[in-house]
Image (cartoon, rainbow, N blue to C red):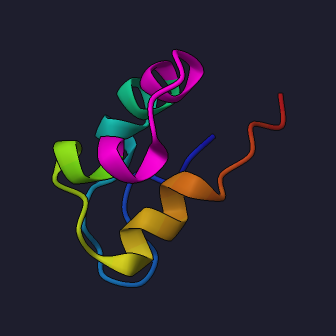
């Protein structure tokens, strides 16, 4: 389960996770998806890119 907010800056990131995963699964470039979603901070990008579902 992805954290609701970025651990470093506090920006909400969980709202973007499902769309990010869907678009990556369709073959889109992760950088382009994050740019399109408006995730510009490195700490927030790290939260989405490195998250691994454990269930």
Locate residue 26 relative to residue 41 in the image: left or right: right
Compare residues 38 and 7 and report the one nearer the observer: 38
Percent x, y of residue 22: 48, 19
Q: Quadrant of residue 49?
A: bottom right
- From this view, report whether residue 23 is shown above or below residue 13: above
Compare residues 21 and 14 and report the one nearer the observer: 21
Q: List the single residue furthest toward the right.
A: 54
Q: Quadrant of residue 16?
A: top left
Total label count? Answer: 0
Instruction: Kindly identify the residue that appears in the image at 63 percent across and 40 percent down.
Output: 1
Q: Main secondary structure of the magenta part?
A: helix
Locate residue 16 relative to residue 4 in the image: left or right: left
Q: Is residue 3 located in the magenta-colored stretch of the structure?
A: no
- From this view, report whether residue 44 is shown above or below residue 52: below
Locate residue 52 relative to residue 15 in the image: left or right: right
Compare residues 1 and 49 and report the one nearer the observer: 49
Q: List the single residue furthest toward the bottom.
A: 8
- From this view, report whether residue 40 is shown above or below residue 32: below
Percent x, y of residue 7: 46, 76
Q: Is residue 25 located in the magenta-colored stretch of the structure?
A: yes
Percent x, y of residue 40: 23, 68
* Magenta span: 22-33
Q: Quadrant of residue 36?
A: top left
Percent x, y of residue 55: 83, 27
Instruction: Kindly identify the residue that appears in the image at 66 percent across and 59 percent down.
Output: 50
């Amino acid at each position: 389960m992805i954290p609701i907010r970025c651990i470093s800056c506090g920006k909400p990131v969980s709202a973007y996770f499902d769309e990010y995963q869907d678009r990556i699964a369709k073959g889109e470039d992760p950088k382009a998806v994050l740019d399109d979603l408006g995730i510009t901070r490195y700490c927030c990008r790290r939260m989405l890119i490195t998250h691994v579902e454990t269930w």
